Image (cartoon, rainbow, N blue to C red):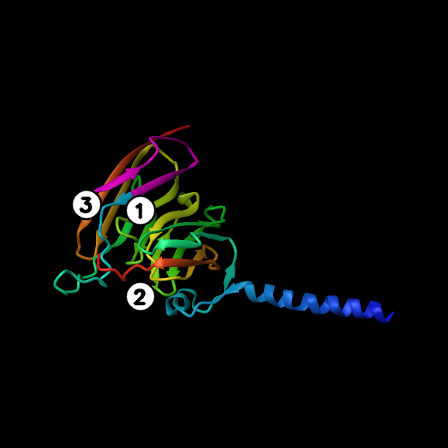
Amino acid sequence: MKRRRFIAQAAGMLALPIATAARAQATLESRLPAVRELTAGAPIRVGRVTLDLPLLSDNGNSVSLHLAVASPMTESDYVRSLHLYAERNPRPNIANFFFSPQSGRAEIASRIRLAGSQRVLAVARMSDGSFWGATADVVVTVSACMDES
Amino acid sequence: MNSRLQVPTTAKRGEPVEIRIAIQHPMETGFRYDAVGHAIPKNVINTLVCRYNGVEVLRAELGSGIAANPYLSFYVVAGDSGELDFRWIDDEGNRGEAHAAISVTA
């Protein structure tokens, strides 16, 4: 009986941090004022947004980026806008994209500048007013904005 | 301003098609200096709008975080045959435009 109770308690202790981690991960936080201004206090939930960036980029002057948001893109449910931030860039707000149901797919590919290794954040605003986001960490060997070329 | 626009010449109605555009532009960040040490003023394409038969389908607000010679790929649902019309403007007020025809089959 003792052993059984021990196993049950051990399992409970193991499960607890996993559960709290999952709850903590459900929303995204950013210290950027621009992000707070965008959401006006609303939570940014993790999911629906896919942010594809290389794990390592030799050159921060041009880093290929692919963004996709899972959405049916109908009149009643579509991605209103997609906002991209690089937290350590001198101007963190890289770009904002505004879609319509006619977009069909909320997908964007482009090339961005990164001033050093950092976390990149993408936030989507849905037509129902909810916010969804994704982050990607990129290691940049040679930063943008630093060379004189 | 030179630009390259790639639009499929034919598309099936109701299907999303990929549109790609690349514009020749230095996207000056404002953080660089010229050979004699003067700051080069910021000059980036700040707004790019794509209209499909007159209806706005994508608006992009770009910043200095977009690489030089900005490239953008996105999707639009093929509706009626017609024209895709791109317009953009940079910080110095220079405007550019590009057009492409798209023919939609049933």
Residue A20 position within the rendered picture, expressed as x and y whole percent measured from the top left: 62, 68
Q: Residue furthest right?
A: A1
Q: Secondary structure at mark 1?
A: strand
Q: Residue furthest left?
A: B36
Amino acid type, mark 2: Pro
Question: Which residue sits at x=28%, y=39%?
Answer: B5
The range drawn in magenta is B1-21
Q: Is A15 situated left or right of B68 in this image?
A: right
Amino acid type, mark 1: Tyr
Position of B4 relative to A12 (above/below): above
Marks 1, 2 in one chain = no
Q: Residue A133 or A110: which is nearer the viewer?
A: A110
Position of A48 relative to A17 (above/below): above
Tell me the residue that label 1 is attached to.
B71
Q: Secondary structure at mark 3?
A: loop
Tell me the residue that label 2 is attached to.
A90
Is residue A22 visible in the rendered image? The answer is yes
Q: Quadrant of the N terminus of chain A?
A: bottom right
Marks 3, 1 in one chain = yes
Q: How far apart in space, not on screen, are marks 2 and 3 (Cα)?
A: 27 Å
**Chain for disc number 2:** A
- The label on residue B1 is 3
Q: Secondary structure at mark 2?
A: loop
**Chain for disc number 1:** B
Contact flag, marks 3 and 1 (Cβ < 8 Å): no
Q: Pointer 1: residues within 10 angstroms few (<14), some, or many (20+)?
A: many
Marks 2, 3 in one chain = no
Q: Does the magenta portion include B16?
A: yes
Q: Does the magenta portion include A55?
A: no
Q: Pointer 2: residues within 10 angstroms few (<14), some, or many (20+)?
A: some
